[in-house]
Image (cartoon, rainbow, N blue to C red):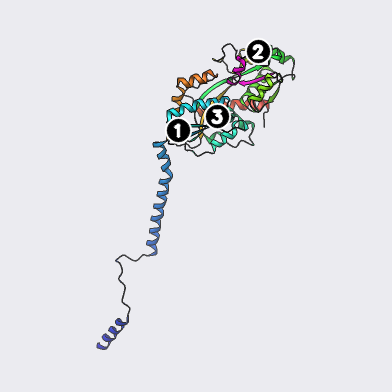
C-alpha cells in the first residue's frame, strides 16, 4: 500500500497543475443550438421592429419635409393650374412646402408612372387627370405599365366640361348649324384634340358616334399647336378643356358650340350643353382631376392627406380660382374606387367604338 501511495504521489506530482475554471456547466451542442435560436429570434424581432418603425413614426410626425406634387404635363394647362392651386392650400393645411414637379410626356403617363414607382411615404403625390389615371392604359396597353392597383386614391379635386368649338372661317354660329354642315359633308371636316386617347379625343368621338357624323380626328402634341392651327384657319373644329378654351371664346376668336356635361357649365351659362341637341342627348363626359399617392400608403398618412384635401376644397380662395377657370369643385363624399371603376367602364366603350389604339 505504501509503494502504491508513493507512486500515486509521484504521478500526481508530474501532472500539470489544473487551470481554474468557472462554475458554468459545459457548453454542449444542444445548448449551442439553443443559444443560436435565441440569438436569431432576437435579431428577427429587432428587424421586425425596425421595419414597422417608419409607419408609426409617420403617424406622429408626417409631414416633416416638403411634399412633391407631380403633374404629368408642362406648365400652363388645366391639370397644372389645378395642381398649383391645390398645392398652395395643402401647404397651409399641412405646414410644409408643397413643390410642383412638371413631368410631361405620353399624355401624362410618365408623371403617373413616377408616382406609381415612388416610395409609399406620402412625400410624392400625383395631381392627375382622367387621361393618365383612367384612359391611357386603355389606348396604350403595350406601353403603360401601371394599373389602378398601383395607386392610393386620396380624393377627387374638381371637374370641368370640355367644349366643342368652331373656327370662324366655317361660318358656323351654333350647334344646330354644326350638325347640319357636318352631316351633309361626311369626311370633309376635321376636329383636333390635344392627343390620341385624351378625354378631349374621347369627347369628340362621342359626338361622332351619337350624331352619326364622319369627321377626321387630328391629334396635336398639346393645346398650343392645336390653338395655332385653329386660330390660323388650318383646322375647322376642336375640343378643348373649358379652362383652355375660355379665353379664346371670350375674345371672340372661336365659336363655342356646346359643352360636354349634361348640364350647362356655370362658367359659360350662355353656351348650351351638347346634350340639348336631340341627336346628342346622351353625351355626358368631363375632364376631372384627382389626388393620388403610390400604393400601400400607411393609413395614418392617408388619413392626414384626405383631411387636408377636404379642408383645402372648402377654401374660398381655392374655390374661386378653380371656378373662375371653369371647374366645379368635387363633392367631399366621392367613393373613389367605385368612381374610378365606373369612369373606366365608360371610357372603354368609347375606345372600343372608335378603335382607339396607340
The first of marks 2 and 3 along the sequence is 3
Q: Which mark is residue 114?
A: none
SS for tag 3?
Answer: strand
Looking at the picture, does residue 316 appear above or below residue 70? above
Bounds of the magenta span?
Answer: 235-253
Give whichever of 34, 252 is nearer the camera.
Answer: 252
Determine the CA span between mark 2 and mark 1: 45 Å
- Whether residue 292 is visible here, answered yes or no, is yes
Q: Nearer the viewer, mark 1 or mark 3?
A: 3
In front: mark 2 or mark 3? 3
- Quadrant of the drawing holding the N terminus: bottom left
Residue at the left extreme of this rendering: 2
Q: Position of residue 47 (x, y in %)?
A: 42, 48
Q: Quadrant of the C terminus?
A: top right
The kind of secondary structure element at disc 2 is helix
Decide: marks 2, 1 in contact (CB < 8 A)? no
Specify which label sits upstream in the sequence, 2 or 1.
2
> What residue is shown at x 37% (from left), y 65% (from top)?
28
Q: Which residue is mark 3?
A: 128
> Residue 325 sits in which quadrant?
top right
Residue indicated by mark 1: 302
Residue at x-position 27% and y-position 83%: 9
What residue is at 54 percent from the left and 36 percent from the top? 115
The local crowd at label 3, few if under 14, some if 14 to 19, many if 20 or more residues have their Cα within 10 Å, is: many
Q: Is residue 111 left or right of residue 310?
A: right
Question: Residue 243 colored magenta?
Answer: yes
Give the spatial CA distance, label 1 vs label 3.
17 Å
Q: CA distance from mark 2 to mark 3?
A: 31 Å
In the image, what residue occupies the spot 61% across and 26% down? Answer: 347
Horizontal placement of 358 versus 56: left or right?
right
Q: Is residue 8 magenta?
A: no
Q: Quadrant of residue 203?
A: top right
Amino acid at each position: 500500500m505504501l509503494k502504491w501511495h508513493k507512486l500515486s504521489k509521484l504521478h500526481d506530482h508530474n501532472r500539470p497543475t489544473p487551470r481554474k475554471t468557472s462554475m458554468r456547466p459545459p457548453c454542449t451542442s444542444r445548448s449551442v443550438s439553443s443559444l443560436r435560436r435565441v440569438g436569431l429570434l432576437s435579431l428577427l424581432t429587432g428587424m421586425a421592429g425596425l421595419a414597422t418603425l417608419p409607419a408609426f413614426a409617420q403617424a406622429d410626425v408626417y409631414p416633416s419635409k416638403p411634399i412633391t406634387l407631380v403633374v404629368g404635363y408642362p406648365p400652363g394647362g388645366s391639370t397644372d393650374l389645378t395642381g398649383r392651386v391645390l398645392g398652395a392650400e395643402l401647404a397651409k393645411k399641412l405646414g410644409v412646402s408643397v413643390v410642383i414637379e412638371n413631368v410631361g410626356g405620353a399624355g401624362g403617363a410618365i408623371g403617373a408612372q413616377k408616382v406609381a414607382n415612388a416610395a409609399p411615404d406620402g412625400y410624392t403625390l400625383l395631381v392627375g387627370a382622367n387621361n393618365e389615371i383612367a384612359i391611357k392604359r386603355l389606348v396604350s396597353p403595350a406601353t403603360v405599365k401601371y394599373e389602378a392597383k398601383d395607386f392610393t386614391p386620396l380624393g377627387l379635386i374638381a371637374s370641368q366640361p370640355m367644349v366643342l368649338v368652331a373656327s370662324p372661317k366655317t361660318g358656323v354660329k351654333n350647334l344646330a348649324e354644326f350638325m347640319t354642315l357636318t352631316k351633309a359633308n361626311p369626311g370633309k371636316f376635321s376636329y383636333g384634340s390635344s392627343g390620341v386617347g385624351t378625354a378631349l379625343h374621347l369627347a369628340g368621338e362621342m359626338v361622332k358616334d351619337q350624331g352619326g357624323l364622319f369627321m377626321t380626328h387630328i391629334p396635336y402634341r398639346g393645346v398650343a399647336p392645336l390653338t395655332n392651327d385653329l386660330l390660323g384657319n388650318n383646322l375647322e373644329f376642336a375640343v378643348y378643356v373649358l379652362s383652355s378654351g375660355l379665353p379664346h371664346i371670350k375674345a371672340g376668336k372661336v365659336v363655342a358650340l356646346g359643352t360636354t356635361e349634361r348640364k350647362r357649365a356655370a362658367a359659360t351659362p350662355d353656351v348650351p350643353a351638347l346634350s340639348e341637341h336631340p341627336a346628342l342627348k346622351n353625351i355626358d363626359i368631363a375632364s376631372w382631376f384627382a389626388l393620388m399617392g403610390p400604393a400601400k400608403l400607411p393609413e395614418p398618412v392617408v388619413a392626414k392627406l384626405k383631411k387636408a384635401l377636404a379642408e383645402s376644397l372648402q377654401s374660398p380662395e381655392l374655390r374661386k380660382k378653380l371656378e373662375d377657370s371653369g371647374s366645379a369643385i368635387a363633392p367631399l363624399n366621392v367613393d373613389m374606387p367605385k368612381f374610378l371603376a365606373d369612369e373606366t367602364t365608360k371610357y372603354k366603350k368609347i375606345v372600343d367604338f372608335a378603335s382607339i389604339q396607340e
